[in-house]
Image (tube, rainbow, N blue to C red):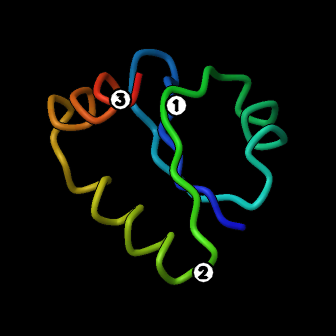
Amino acid sequence: MWFVYICDRNGQFYTGITTDLIHRMNQHKVELLYSESYSDKHKAAKRERQIMGWRREKKLALINNSR
């Protein structure tokens, strides 16, 4: 399973992918704000690139709508 995630890194949104979400958050020492799961690395990477291209406001809306 692959995860696309958004975390808060010193006031900035950071988007990435990983297979171990908890371990990755511990590495970053950050708060997880949002995640999606994918069975395929290619699909996860494609979604990561899509989200990375968004403005902060659109990422914030995605985060807020998931809560």
Q: Is residue 54 left or right of residue 51?
A: left
Q: Are marks 2 and 3 in contact (CB under 8 Å)?
A: no
Label 3 sits on a secondary structure element that is helix
Q: Secondary structure at mark 1?
A: strand
Mark 1–mark 3 Cα distance, whole angstroms, equals: 10 Å
Mark number, residue 57? none
- Residue 12: quarter of image: top left
Q: Position of residue 55 (x, y in %)?
A: 15, 40
Residue type indicated by callout 3: Ile
Above or below, 18 relative to 62 = below
Q: Amino acid at mark 1?
A: Cys
Q: Amino acid at mark 2?
A: Asp
Mark 1 residue crowding within 10 angstroms, few (<14) / some (14–19) / many (20+): many
Q: Earlier in the sequence, mark 1 or mark 3?
A: 1
Where, quadrant-wise, is the N terminus in this rendering?
Answer: bottom right
**Residue at which label 1 appears:** 7
- The percent coordinates of residue 60 (x first, y second) are 26, 27
Residues 65 and 25: in front is: 65
**On the image, numbered disc 2 is attached to which residue?**
40
Residue drawn at x 38%, y 66% is 47
Secondary structure beneath dot 2 equals loop
To which residue does mark 3 refer?
A: 63
Question: Of tags 1 and 3, which is closer to the observer?
Answer: 3
